[in-house]
Amino acid sequence: MENYRFRFANEKDCRLILKFIRSLAKYEKMEDEVVATQELLREQLFEKKKAEVLFVMDGEKEVGFALFFHNFSTFLGRAGIYLEDLYVRPAYRGRGYGKALLQELAHIAVNRGCGRLEWSCLDWNQPSIDFYKSLGAIPMDEWTVYRATGDTLLEMAGRKKE
C-alpha cells in the first residue's frame, strides 16, 4: 500500500460513486433499497453540497470511498463528521485502505475543528465491528437509531402520500 493517496470526488465521479454505493449495498444485503441515481447524486453532492466523498487511490485507481457530512453536537457545541458509507473493494481489503480512509477522515475532522467522528455499523458485521474497535472506536450500545422514510416521513411532515 505504499502508493496510495486520497482525492475528493468531483461531479464527473457520480457514476463511480453510485457503483461504490451499489457494491456496499450488495455487501450489506440491501441492494433493493438503493434508489439513488447519478443525477440525484450530482444534485445533492455537487450542487447542494449536502455531503462529500473521499476516495482512497492505489496508483490511479479508486479502491475505496467514504461518503460523509457534517452534523452538530449540542453537548460539545461543535460540528462533527458523520460517516455514512465506507467501502473498500474486496480485492483491496486487508491492506490498510479502510484504516487509511478513517485516519484521513479523523484528520479532516481535527483540521475542521470538529468534536467527533461517528458512524453506524450493522450488528451482524463482525469483521467491521472488530476493525473499528481495533482503532479505538467505542460502540454506543445505549443508543438506538430511529428512522422515518418514504410514506412515514410524508405522514410525519403532515403531507399526503402521492
Image (cartoon, rainbow, N blue to C red):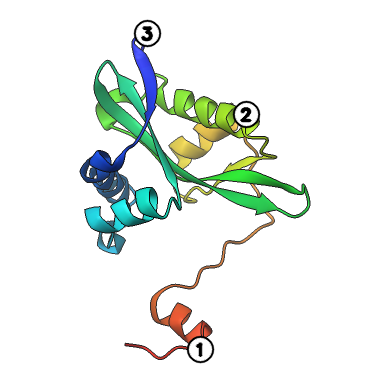
The quarter of the picture where the C terminus appears is: bottom left
Report whether residue 6 is seen.
Answer: yes
- Residue 157: x percent and y percent? 51, 83
Which residue is situated farthest in the top direction here? Answer: 2
Q: Amino acid at mark 1?
A: Gly
- Residue 49: x percent and y percent? 43, 50
Label 3's element? loop
Q: Quadrant of residue 127?
A: top left
Q: Dot 3, how many residues are within 10 Å of its Cα: few (below 14), some (14-19), or many (20+)?
A: few
Q: Is residue 49 left or right of residue 78?
A: left
Give the residue number, with chain letter if any, for mark 1.
Answer: 158
Residue at 56%, 67% (x, y): give it.
146
Label 1's element? loop
Between disc 2 and disc 3, the foreground one is: 2
Foreground: 9 or 67? 9
Residue at 32%, 38% (x, y): give it.
10
Q: Is residue 108 left or right of residue 152?
A: right
Q: CA distance from mark 3 to mark 1?
A: 54 Å
Give the residue number, with chain letter if any, for mark 3.
Answer: 2
Q: Amino acid at mark 3?
A: Glu
Q: Amino acid at mark 2?
A: Asn
Q: Is residue 69 above or below residue 102?
A: below
Q: CA distance from mark 2 to mark 3?
A: 24 Å
- Residue 29: x percent and y percent? 30, 54
Q: Dot 1, how many residues are within 10 Å of its Cα: few (below 14), some (14-19), or many (20+)?
A: few
Give the residue number, with chain letter if any, for mark 2.
Answer: 111
Residue at 40%, 91% (x, y): give it.
160
Q: CA distance from mark 2 to mark 1?
A: 40 Å
Q: Give the mark nearer the N terminus: 2 vs 1.
A: 2
The quarter of the picture where the N terminus appears is: top left
